[in-house]
Image: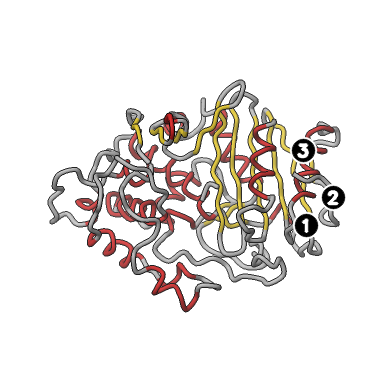
Amino acid sequence: MTTRPVPWPGDPLGVTGELPPGDPPLDASADADDDVVRRLDAAVGAVDAPDVVFALSRHGRRTVRCGGSAPPPCVARHELRYEMGSASKTFTGLLLAHLTQTGRLSAAEPAATILDPTRPAGPDPVTLAHLITHTSGLPGLPADFFVRALPTWRTNPYARYPAERVIDAFLRHRRRRKPGTRWHYSNFGVAVLGHALMAATATPWDELLTGQVLRPLRLSGTTLCPGGTDTDAVGHLRDGTTPTPALSVGGFQAAGAVRATPHDLLTFLEAHLDPAGRPLTDALRAVRRPVLRRGLGHRHVHTVAWFQHPTEHGPMYFHGGATLGQQAFLGFRPDTGTALAAMCTRRFRARDAFIPTAYALLAEA
């Protein structure tokens, strides 16, 4: 699959029915738009998972609907933090854009030289830009990942692959193609990017992302570590009943560590809808610009942080994510002033309803 780069700007992934027993509605106001409520209720009802949350913001007016097949948890579903999985990459992309927009580093810097200053860059090095756009030539996961993860495959496969192994696997990797010539989605690549950003700034990942992105955007309900049953949603396997432990990402923090509340996710997305006058304004604008086109006719468009699809009136931006027991979908549409954050506590098979339902809800907004 060939790619065509666009100049760098300074796990993507409808049946309606009665709303399952669950939490009472949480709307921004008592007279929340009836059509929005109806659509969100239908989306919740279409997803067969223990816990389901659909949170929508339109021109800053929020409506959140919750439900699920399980009894409501002790903490209301809309107040829990949910595992973002690969949707965490939107936070990493924004961080990279911020560091480049403020001149802290260049997206053209070779990752290997940052991680090992004694190593010469060599011809056609893998850059930070290659890593975030999935054009580095790296596989989805390191070659030895599956052997190490097998003993905990159904509990916490990433936990057995720490940071030092991610870095070592990258520095030892023998590439098969020139960076920038093919697109291949890679958790490995974005994990390497996180370690390169840590090395370049001499800052641990949690401190770096919190200080540069979470705190400026006032995302106090977002974290990178499990908190406990009173703060975090509990995931479930595909059977919808077997609980899963809280995700431990090992050395893959930049690729999947974020967990957040629905309202924090709407705050994050609203900042992308209207960057003017906000912290990280330049970075928020930068991550909306196309940087890569791929596929037949170069119809698939990517930004630094988002997948971009066309609609009748303008582009929509989205990213999905999944962990062993949870799924998430984040998206926004500047043309309609709409942002959507959807979460559920079940890992689905590829053809189940969650992602198609969330995507359709945003596309039809």
Q: Quadrant of residue 234?
A: bottom right
Residue 293 to residue 208: above or below: above
Q: Secondary structure at mark 1?
A: loop
Per the rendering, the mark at residue 19 is: 2
Query: Which one is nearer the viewer's eye here, 97 or 29?
Result: 97
Q: Position of residue 36 (x, y in %)?
A: 78, 34
Q: Position of residue 159 (x, y in %)?
A: 45, 70
Q: Residues within 10 Å of mark 3 (few under 14, many from 20)?
A: some
Query: Colour mode?
Result: secondary structure
The alpha-carbon separation of the residues under discs 3 and 1 comes to 21 Å
The tag earlier along the polypeptide, 1 or 2, is 2
Q: Secondary structure at mark 2?
A: loop
Disc nearest the viewer among 3 and 2: 2
115 vs 56: above or below: below
Which residue is label 3 attached to? 28
Identify the residue at image location x=43%, y=50%: 209
Mark 1–mark 2 Cα distance, whole angstroms, equals 8 Å
Mark positioned earlier in the residue sequence (3 or 1): 3
**Disc number placed over residue 68 in the picture, else none:** 1
